[in-house]
Amino acid sequence: MNLQSIADRLYETDVLVVGGGTAGCPAAWKAAKNGLDVIMIEKNHTARSGHCAQGIDTNLNFPRPGVPLKLHVADWQKRHHMFYGEGKFCDPNIGWVTFEKAYWALKQMEDMGCEMRWEKGPDGKVLFIPNMFFGGDENQIAVHWRNIKRDMYNACLKAGVKVLNRIMLIDLLTENGRVIGATCYDTREGSFIVIMAKVVIMAAGPLARTYDSETPMFYKYKYRYHGAPGALSGDGLAAAYRAGAELVNMDIGNCWFYRLRDDILMPIGQVFHRDGVNGRWTDYEGNQYPPIATARLYAELEEAGKTPVFLSQTHLNEDYQKRIEVATADERMVSLKLSEDRGFNPAEHRYEIQPMHLHNFATACGIVVDETFESNTLKGLFAVGDIAAALSSCGPAVTSGMIVGEAMPEYIKNAHLDKQGNVDMNQITAAKAIVDRYASTPDGCNPIELEASVRYISTVYISQYKQANKLKVGQQRLNSLRREFYDNMDGSNPHHLMRCLETRNIMDMQQVHIDACFSRPETRGNYTWQGTWERDPARDDMLTYQRMENGKPVLEIRHVPELKEKYVNSPDDAEIECADLYWDELKKESERK
Amino acid sequence: MMGPIKIDYKKCIGCKKCYDLCPQDIYVIDKETGMPKVVYEDECWLCGICWMECPKRAIDIRLTACFW
Ligand SMILES: Cc1cc2nc3c(=O)[nH]c(=O)nc-3n(C[C@H](O)[C@H](O)[C@H](O)COP(=O)(O)OP(=O)(O)OC[C@H]3O[C@@H](n4cnc5c(N)ncnc54)[C@H](O)[C@@H]3O)c2cc1C
Ligand code: SF4
Ligand code: SF4
């Protein structure tokens, strides 16, 4: 059997970008602008896919003028302490380059035609606001990103990127520790596609669908995630892992300290923090508490029987309330419609604050990369955006995408990648066999039902209170699910088959997560409640790394890298590329601080 | 039964934007009528993209009881 006969479609390209989201689009655009052949595959439709599809309101990571970059990196690490406890959780070199290139990336975004200014028109200002949320030294910018995905999509098309919508990654193709392409599935037509590429940029977003969604939900309507469910199945993580890329911190998921529980609106926390104006914490009787939301304060109130607590904005002036309403409508348009249906009045509304359970893997965990964003174990695989270890949110996603897109011509030249790799037909037939098996199991289990079971078991037996015995029982239950259903899902039409492939990835990543939890008792603690971890100082700054080697999982606990000499020794007043383009607005903001 | 998505076929012009853009792929184009049909409604996450993109506001999104 040869490639032509097994693949319904076959492509060759210089660069394959997996996932047309916030990080993937800039990477594809920049690589195409630099003269490369680029294919970008997107499971949904690039114009409205991924986490930015509905718009977001802030873009983070801009270092403040006059503050040395080293302090910004230290601050960034402090933020991780706040979430996860003591110790370093990320490679600081990655933090360094994303801060260093933030203004450069902002300039590229403007060149791409994205709306980066608060007021429209040539005189519009980039609206820098202090990052009150993390109390740090950096700026974020307020953005109208309602149509950011559409604008990015159009820019990619114009730059000559071949965008393949509704095409889903199945697995990566490798040759001697190097990525040489991918197998894919057309989620509408059901065809099997092979793409040969000199490099692959993985931008498929984070993982969350191993845990229950944020609002308890019965079987129907189960996708109430804060993140975009289509981008949360961890497809990219799973495929990279199976191909030999190393993952890190898969024991550590994200738990926000609190969330605003409101069934009609997405959280609007940032609106308060912007300009340093805070909402008020009050309890049911109207008693007020300090406005800074911490897990500890919440726990104290819970113990004292004072919960539920609310974030109230009734004391803010009318102008502010209008802005809240506008921000809510602007960035999450349907929310305003739904809230109007329910008679929402921002002047009177109180948002209930709740601690959040473990819900996704985005911030500290992901594919291990160095500051060039190339995988440490799989050559030719780059990871950008939330899927890369140490990166999360839009600023780092865009910046990492731009950096990698920019570096691709040099990389391809230096690595002498002048022709495509040699395909191992076994890898192709293995991927095709997975598709065929699901396609021919009409009486198999519903993939979403299986996913719901995995999520339920994870939430009950793993989640935050991970004690060894519970983990063991959870593992047993997941094993039996896997034995019975992993190969036995109903993919009798392309839509279902897409969900089968997702569930396969979710189950593979949940196994990696459990292995990681077993390996480190001290990361089993829970950090949204009063206690933090049972800290083992001997393991401070040590992380859990996992990869597949010769078909076997390998787990190591190693030191997180230090900030490199060249960065440590760089002058405090080193110039940051393109910052001067925005300097005036920035300085004003800094003076205000 | 009430679900989150409802198409008003009196307003719909069959432009297929909802079908093209829905990130959860809940729509299917009916072969006979050429019009969009809600098929995988239980996978909707109420993002509002179809509602926002529909040129005729032919789609209504309603909160079902479990989102209330
Ligand atoms: C409602 C909301 C509000 C937010 N607000 C903010 C904010 O104000 N500020 C901020 O900085 N951040 C915010 N975020 C987070 C931010 O949007 C994300 O961190 C960022 O967009 C991640 O970018 P990404 O490219 O890594 O992932 P995404 O943008 O999610 O892109 C991943 C893409 O990969 C595709 N994909 C997945 N699997 C496959 C596969 N197998 N094959 C092909 N394609 C695949 C997905 O469809 C998706 O389009 C918000 C997120 C949400 C959901
Ligand atoms: S609200 Fe979003 S997920 Fe639901 S049908 Fe519309 S576009 Fe699809
Ligand atoms: S977007 Fe609106 S008008 Fe277009 S096909 Fe869908 S429902 Fe009909």
Image (spheres, coloured by chain):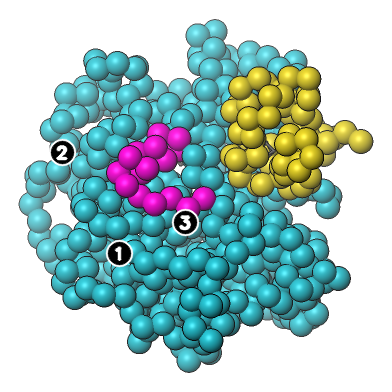
Chain colours: A cyan, B yellow
As helix, strand or loop, the secondary structure at mark 3 comes to strand
Compare marks 1 and 2 and give the one earlier in the sequence.
Answer: 1
Q: Which residue is mark 1?
A: A14
Q: Which residue is mark 2?
A: A578
Mark 3 C-beta to ligand 1 under 8 Å: yes
- Label 2 vs label 3: CA separation? 31 Å
* Quadrant (top left, top right, bottom left, bottom right) of the C terminus of chain A: top left
Q: Is residue B45 left or right of residue A532?
A: right
Q: Which amino acid, by three-letter code, is at mark 3?
A: Ile
Please state which of the two labelled residues, at mark 1 or mark 2, is closer to the viewer.
Answer: 1
Q: Which amino acid, by three-letter code, is at mark 1?
A: Asp
**Number of numbered discs present?**
3
For the record, the magenta segment spans A149-165
Within 10 angstroms of label 3, few (less than 14), some, or many (20 or more) residues? many
Task: Identify the residue at horizontal 47%, vertical 56% (top origin).
Answer: A41
Please state which of the two labelled residues, at mark 2 or mark 3, is closer to the viewer.
Answer: 3
Question: Quarter of the image holding residue A12?
Answer: bottom left
Q: Position of residue A535 (x, y in %)?
A: 50, 70
Compare marks 2 and 3 and give the one earlier in the sequence.
Answer: 3
Q: Position of residue A557 (x, y in %)?
A: 43, 81
Q: Does residue A479 lie above or below A330 as drawn?
A: below
User: Looking at the image, which is closer to me, A539 or A397?
Assistant: A397
Contact between labelled residues 3 and 1, with CB atoms less than 8 Å apart: no
User: Looking at the image, which is closer to me, A548 or A573?
Assistant: A548
- Label 1 vs label 3: CA separation? 14 Å
Q: Which residue is mark 3?
A: A41
Task: Identify the residue at horizontal 61%, vertical 33% (top origin).
Answer: B17
Q: Which amino acid, by three-letter code, is at mark 2?
A: Cys
Q: Are marks 1 and 3 on the same chain?
A: yes
Q: Is residue A143 left or right of residue A138?
A: right
Q: Residue furthest top?
A: A318
